[in-house]
Image: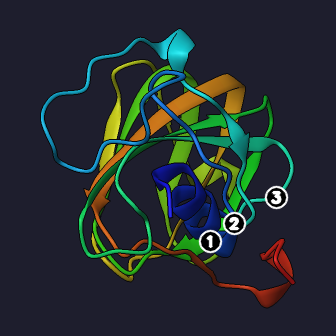
Amino acid sequence: MNKTFILTATALTLGLSTATASAETLPYHGNGHIIGSANELEWGPVGSMGGGAEIAIIEGDLSEEAPFTIRLRLEDGYEIKPHVHPAYERVTVLSGTLHFAHGETYDPEATRALSEGGFAIMSPGDPMFGYAEGETIIQLHGVGPWGIEYHNHEDDPRN
């Protein structure tokens, strides 16, 4: 099987779209170097986050126990409902403003505004929530497998 087919099948299984660093390069998997620019990223829907959020996978396979780097693009006003992840989450705000907080109850007043260059690191299982002010792009990296579990079942767009 060719790499494109395998990558596409994996991404569809996760409910994510594929993304590449250039038209001829698949997401990086630890071999050699990869160099690219933001305008070379391919964005697609994030099944686990619903409308208003898009993903670009820069490196890794989110279903494997391996390093990954992704970017999320959130439309203005996009709400990130309370959720947890199975591994450390490391976030850097690249553009826009991410209002972010720790907790199991969505409370916009409890958030801290993180503008360009702002960052957050959360432990596995620590609940978090937030919202985007203006179109906001954040970069996440860590070690998979990656996933999201919403505190309230009704907040999960996969249901």
Q: Which residue is mark 1?
A: 14
Pointer 2 with pointer 1, Cβ within 8 A: yes
Q: Nearer the viewer, residue 46 or 101?
A: 46
The quadrant in which the C terminus is found is bottom right
Assign a secondary structure to mark 2.
helix
Residues packed near mark 3 inside 10 Å, few (<14), some (14 to 19) or many (20 plus): some
In 3D space, how far apart are the residues under numbered discs 3 and 2 (Cα atoms)? 15 Å
User: Against 9, is 38 above or below?
Assistant: above
Q: Quadrant of residue 34?
A: top left
Residue 16 on image: x %, y %? 66, 58
Write the residue at 32% across / 70% down. Answer: 144
Give the distance between the C-alpha atoms of the residues marked 3 and 1, in whole angstroms: 13 Å
Q: What number is the disc on residue 12?
A: 2
Q: Residue furthest bottom?
A: 153
Indicate whether 95 appears above or below 28: above
Mark 1 residue element: helix
**Could you say which quadrant of the image residue 28 lies in?**
top left
Q: Which residue is mark 3?
A: 50
Would you say residue 129 is visible in this rendering? no
* Image position, residue 93 (x, y; %): 43, 29
Q: Is residue 13 left or right of residue 85?
A: right
